Image (tube, rainbow, N blue to C red):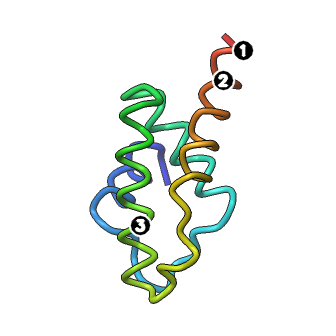
Amino acid sequence: MTDQEFLRVFLRGWPPGDRFGHYEHLRIAWLVIERHGPEMAAEIVGDRLRQMAIAQGTAPLYNETLTRFWIRFIAHVRDAMV
């Protein structure tokens, strides 16, 4: 799946039952940071992950603090690579 397709599927609602593991978390964070910057990415990614967790019955697994930490960390790594 291309980055654009991946982003579109994530934003529209990840298909129930499809794997969304560590790699997918990192990929979506990278793509959204690239397009919107880290502050807006934290809002966008956090909101979608929270909605996914609720829809899958795993709401207690979502952690806002960790999501924001990882968004900032990934943004830092991106900036260091440029």
How many labels sit on residues?
3
Position in image of residue 53 (x %, y %): 46, 76
Circles 2, 3 touching at the beta carbon (< 8 Å): no
Task: Identify the secondary structure beneath mark 2.
Answer: helix
What residue is drawn where x is 35% and y is 57%?
47
Give how far apart the Cα atoms at labels 2 and 3 are: 23 Å
Per the image, the residue denoted by label 2 is 76
Residue 38, percent from left and from top: 47, 30
Residue that extends furthest to the front in the rendered view of this protein: 65
| Mark-to-mark CA distance, 1 and 2 | 6 Å
User: Any mark on residue 4, and which?
Assistant: none
**Image quadrant assignment for residue 76:** top right
Residue at point 62% right, 42% down? 69
The answer to whether the residue labelled 1 contacts the one labelled 2, judged by CB atoms less than 8 Å apart, is yes
**Residue 82 x/y as whole percent:** 66, 10
Residue type at mark 1: give it: Ala
Whichever of callouts 3 and 1 sits on the residue coming sooner in the sequence is: 3
Callout 2 crowding tier (Cα within 10 Å): few <14, some 14–19, many ≥20: few
Quarter-wise, where is residue 71 in the image?
top right
The residue carrying mark 3 is 50
| Vertical side of 38 occupied by 79: above or below | above
Front disc: 3 or 1? 3
Callout 1: helix, strand or loop?
helix
Q: Which mark is residue 80?
A: 1
Q: Nearer the viewer, residue 54 or 4?
A: 54
The CA span between labels 3 and 1 is: 29 Å
Determine the residue located farthest toward the left in the rendered image: 12
> Where is 19 relative to 9, above or below?
below
Q: Position of residue 6 (x, y in %)?
A: 44, 53
